[in-house]
Amino acid sequence: MTGFVVDALSGDHDRAGFSCGVDALDKYLQSQAGQDARRRIANCFVALAAGSKAVAGYYTLSATSIATPDLPETITRRLPRYPLVPAVLIGRLAVDQRYGGRGLGAALLFDAIRRCAAADAAVFAVVVDAKDERSVRFYEHHGFIRFGSRPLSLYLPMATAIALLGVDRSS
Ligand SMILES: CC(C)(COP(=O)(O)OP(=O)(O)OC[C@H]1O[C@@H](n2cnc3c(N)ncnc32)[C@H](O)[C@@H]1OP(=O)(O)O)[C@@H](O)C(=O)NCCC(=O)NCCS
């Protein structure tokens, strides 16, 4: 992510001018993200252009789980018969329109996956909640697979992510 640093959201960061084109995602960053982090509901990570405190993009991470029957048989036949498998949810991901189309969204997605791969708690897959069909296409473009039961939710098995992106616990 040349020219950007990614940091955990803090009071030092300027969020007031953030505008990704989806009002609910702007408002979340401006008024809810800090509270969710303090209450351990979701951690928020922000991209800042070098030398700037203004947020250029952000994503959130929370623990979640996947009901094993929501996964295809090609995956579950290699799993123990547990009802749930552990996952991390990227609940929100957004890039300020001023920085759109330059690879920042993809870089934030990779940063999120790298963090999940490095976590001490085991993570079987990364799950994303897309806002609409356009966002679904963004995630499909990066290898995510739709859940049959929830059309705006997608997952990427961590083993696939590690193979695709070359990330692992040491990177
Ligand atoms: C979706 C979003 C995060 C993309 O960020 P971005 O920085 O403009 O995207 P990037 O420049 O990193 O694009 C990376 C790749 O994804 C592709 N891409 C971007 N948006 C896409 C879409 N809607 N459908 C398919 N592919 C898409 C790009 O063409 C690019 O492809 P390439 O790597 O083959 O060149 C951004 O447009 C955004 O914040 N949108 C509003 C909020 C939103 O929809 N968030 C997502 C779900 S909550």
Image (cartoon, rainbow, N blue to C red):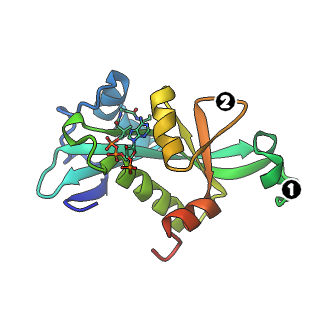
Quarter of the image with the N terminus is: bottom left
Task: Identify the residue at image location x=63%, y=53%.
Answer: 125
Task: Identify the residue at image location x=63%, y=29%.
Answer: 151
Choose the circle earlier in sequence order: 1 or 2.
1
Give percent across and percent down for residue 2: 23, 62
SS for dot 2: loop
Q: Residues within 10 Å of mark 2 (few under 14, many from 20)?
A: few
Is the Cβ of the residue at disc 1 closer than 8 Å to that at disc 2?
no
Residue 121 bears which disc, if any?
Answer: none
Task: Identify the residue at image location x=22%, y=44%.
Answer: 55
Farthest top residue in view = 23
Give percent across and percent down for residue 97: 23, 34
Residue 150 bears which disc, if any?
Answer: 2
Q: Left or right: 163 with respect to 141?
A: right
Q: Amino acid at mark 2?
A: Arg
Check the image and report above or below for 27 versus 92: above
Q: Residues within 10 Å of mark 1 (few under 14, many from 20)?
A: few
Give percent across and percent down for residue 138: 45, 40
Quarter of the image with the C terminus is: bottom left
Give the residue number, with chain letter if any, for mark 1: 77
Farthest bottom residue in view = 170
Task: Identify the residue at image location x=22%, y=57%.
Answer: 4
Frontmost residue, 141 versus 12: 141
